[in-house]
Image (cartoon, grey):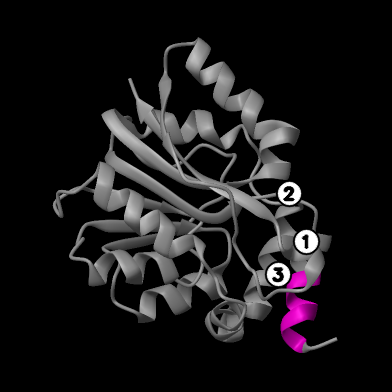
Amino acid sequence: MSDSEAHLKYVYAADGNASALSHSYDGWARDYDADMSGWGYRHPSIIAGMVGRHAPSHRTEILDAGCGTGVLGETLAVLGYAAIDGIDLSEGMLQVAGSKGCYRDLKQQMLGETLDFGTGAYGAIVSSGVMTPGHAPATCLHELARVLKPGGHMILTITEQAWTDSYGAAVAGLVADGIISLHDQSQRYVGLPGAPEAERLPARVHVLRRT
């Protein structure tokens, strides 16, 4: 097993434990970008396309929820978005993200807990590769909806397994409560087509609009 495969295995073995996840990602931070690129990481480019479709103004204030090393933030910055904040549970990942100079602000915060932002703080929220088994709990959607402005969009990758396990029900609950509406989604695709077979997880990008 290669070092990159071992990092991926340890991340999924953490099974949602915040301390174990943080430790695993801290240890992976230095090699993360190269490993993900080598596996053909698709999520950031598809999210960026959806951001251009649904939040075309470059003045849109964006929260990158689970920003990791800043792969998505860097992509959005190249496209002209300048007001991007990021949160992640891993200090090591945040250090790499900070070195790229594409974020206005970065904070160490955990999805699924109360976020240190005001209600309606952001015009768009993006999240790449986070809503997958063993990572952020589906309950995080309620708090993300809170910090999203009315009319704003959450643009999220959600694996099919995570959708079936919990995210589909969480989204349905928010829709039933009149908090969000289902606005758009991508076709089905595999986020890491070059990764070990067990981690080639089918996913979609879902766009949820705050009512």
First to last magenta residue range: 3-9
* The label number, if any, that marks residue 133 in the structure image: 2
Which amino acid, mark 3? His
The reply, left or right, for residue 53 in relation to residue 144 is left
* The label number, if any, that marks residue 12 in the structure image: 1
| Residue neighbourhood size for the residue with mark 2, other residues' Cα within 10 Å, grouped as few (<14), some (14–19), many (≥20) | some
The reply, left or right, for residue 101 in relation to residue 98 is left
* The label number, if any, that marks residue 23 in the structure image: 3
**Residues at marks 1 and 2 touching, judged by CB atoms closer than 8 Å:** yes
Which amino acid, mark 2? Pro
| Residue neighbourhood size for the residue with mark 1, other residues' Cα within 10 Å, grouped as few (<14), some (14–19), many (≥20) | some
Which amino acid, mark 1? Tyr
Q: Of circles 1 and 3, which is in front?
A: 1
| Secondary structure that dominates the magenta span | helix
**Residue at image location 41% in from the left, 49% down from the top:** 126
Q: Earlier in the sequence, mark 3 or mark 2?
A: 3
Residue 6 in the magenta stretch? The answer is yes
